[in-house]
Image: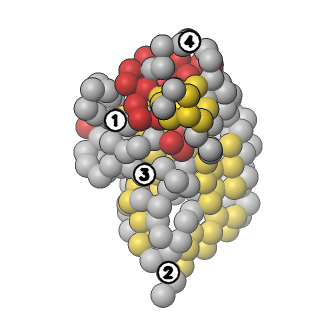
Amino acid sequence: MMPLFILSQELTYVPDDNFETYLETYFPACDNGIDNDDYVLTSGLYGGGENPYECINLTPQTLDAPIFDLTGIEDFQGGIKGMRIEQQLIQNLNLAMFKFMPGSTAGCNYVLYGTSDLFISQCTLLEEILLPSDTIALSISGCPLLDNVYFPEDISLYSVAITGVNMCELKIRGQGLIYSQAYPFIISLGGIGLSATN
């Protein structure tokens, strides 16, 4: 994403008005003062500090309408301990450049394992996820069109729970595989491959 500079303020493009409203409400430091203009202040995209939240909760409880496009999420500057995406109409989720902040997610209204949690549920149009290279606990459920989940080679997985998807194969490669099976691991999966690279 190429940031835009206006009046010496770096802006992040956020084409989905519902996502822009969410960001400006829950992360007020990114509010540029103009509603629904498709931009937020890049310098305000962080958790903690003058922003009261350290977790991104994109759920029906926190939104007036569903989100179709999460463009702009990649510009978060840090401070985010966890992310919950539930019942949104996104097709792709690119978190490849996203960096979670290590620490407890106890204040996120959900806790998988108390580490950086990524919880994705009931996103019925979601087809593809690119994961960050962090240590995360990953939970994906009820995403029937999900075909691809890209795991970077340097990811450290604390746990993986994937249910209610129609993927045929899951391959996880990397040096930091930390596996704990607290939930059913896979439903409707033709094969699974786990490997470590040297």
Task: Residue under label 4, please give it.
Answer: 35
Residue visible at 55% across and 22% down in the picture: 20
Q: Are marks 1 and 3 in contact (CB under 8 Å)?
A: no
Structural distance between the alpha carbons of marks 3 and 4: 27 Å
Secondary-structure class at tag 1: loop
* Local secondary structure at mark 4: loop
Point 55% across, 65% down: residue: 152
Residue indicated by mark 3: 99
Q: Earlier in the sequence, mark 3 or mark 2?
A: 3
Give the Cα distance between marks 1 and 2. 32 Å
Q: Which residue is mark 1?
A: 47
| Residue 156 drawn at (x, y percent) | 42, 65
- Crowding near the residue tagged with mark 1, few <14, some 14–19, many ≥20 C-alpha atoms within 10 Å: many
Mark 3: which secondary structure? loop
Question: Which kind of residue does numbered mark 4 sit on?
Answer: Asp
Q: Nearer the viewer, mark 4 or mark 2?
A: 4
Badge number at residue 132: none
In the drawing, does residue 61 fall left or right of residue 127? Answer: left
Query: How far from the left and from the top, in percent, is residue 68?
Result: 68, 28
The residue type indicated by label 2 comes to Ala
Query: How many residues crowd around disc 3 within 10 Å: few (fewer than 14), some, or many (20 or more)?
Result: many
Sooner in the amino-acid sequence: mark 4 or mark 2: 4
**Which circle's residue, 1 or 3, is located before the other in the chain?**
1
